Image (spheres, rainbow, N blue to C red):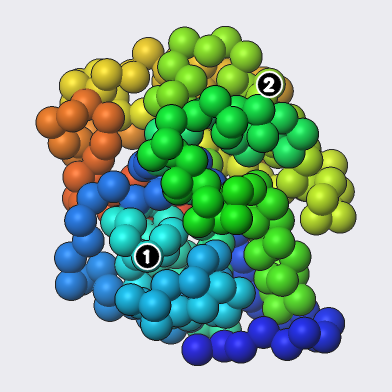
Amino acid sequence: MITLSNCAIAQDENFYIFLSFGQSNMEGHAKFEEIDTEVDERFQVLQAVDCENLERKKGIWYPAAAPLTRCHTGLGPSDYFGRELVENLPAHIKVGVINVSVGGTKIELFQKDNYQSYVDTAPDWLQNMVKEYDGDPYGRLIEMAKLAQKDGVIKGILLHQGESNTGDQEWPLKVKGVYDTIVEDLGLDENSLPILAGEMVSAEQGGKCASMNAIIATLPQVIPNAYVISSENCEAVNDGLHFSATGYRELGRRYGKQMLAILGY
């Protein structure tokens, strides 16, 4: 366990940090297994909410054993994204993730200036999840990211969202707005962070929102540093919306392989 200091400390340039956000697939929908709780300590998670059941406190780094999002969430792509990286990066490099995701949400929840009107009209179950981030998931993501910048270097963003915006032709521009705000709020250069966006469950796996993949495919047209992660052949469950644990492991490793290529490995 690594405790954060209140004062600014020298960045470790060998600590690569990634921001994860989205809806239920990024939150982690599959029940994790014992294998998913065994992890190289070079892969860490910055806890975004207090979880007594996990003996984790907000704002502290822990080995990234599932669950990575909140106290009772499941397995998602971030889990095996980090494993893929630490297995393939030099031994002196550590990897950290910050995951702030809310099942069932539209991208509008992460719009800094508009989220409140979205939350105000959201169903009770979604409002209850938002309350776990003190009513502002985007604000919590930035709060944690700024803490993390004291310890390492933010290297990229992982996104899995779209089921709740299926058919929304404005989705790529909405994502760009969120992306631009993240980069600005963290004091980073415009378009400096790669953003990896995963596809919905594919049509071949019975994906109910597979039509959204054509819209996701256009994201690199509006964000130069965007990459789309294929969900082809990633095993799904019968609801047509979510991946199985096996599917998440594969999808997560695909995110990882793309990031490794971006980083030059």
Query: Which image quarter holds the C terminus?
Result: bottom right
Is residue 185 placed above or below 174 in the rendered structure? below
In terms of image quadrants, where is residue 60?
bottom right
Q: Residue at x 64, y 56 (%)?
A: 140
Mark 2: few/some/many CA within 10 Å (<14, 14-19, 20+): some
Q: Position of residue 234 (x, y in %)?
A: 25, 38
* Along the viewing direction, whichever of 77 and 164 lies nearer the viewer: 164
Task: Please name the residue shown 66% across and 64% down the image.
Answer: 144
* SS assignment at label 1: loop
- Residue that badge 1 annotates: 71
Residues under labels 1 and 2: Cα distance? 32 Å
Which amino acid type corresponds to the residue marked 2 in the rendered image?
Answer: Leu
Would residue 226 be visible to someone looking at this image? no
**Residue 97: where, in percent of width, then height?**
53, 64
In the rendered image, residue 150, in percent from the top left (x then y), is placed at 76, 76
Q: Nearer the viewer, mark 1 or mark 2?
A: 1
Q: Is residue 104 above or below residue 87?
A: above
Report the residue marked by disc 2: 173
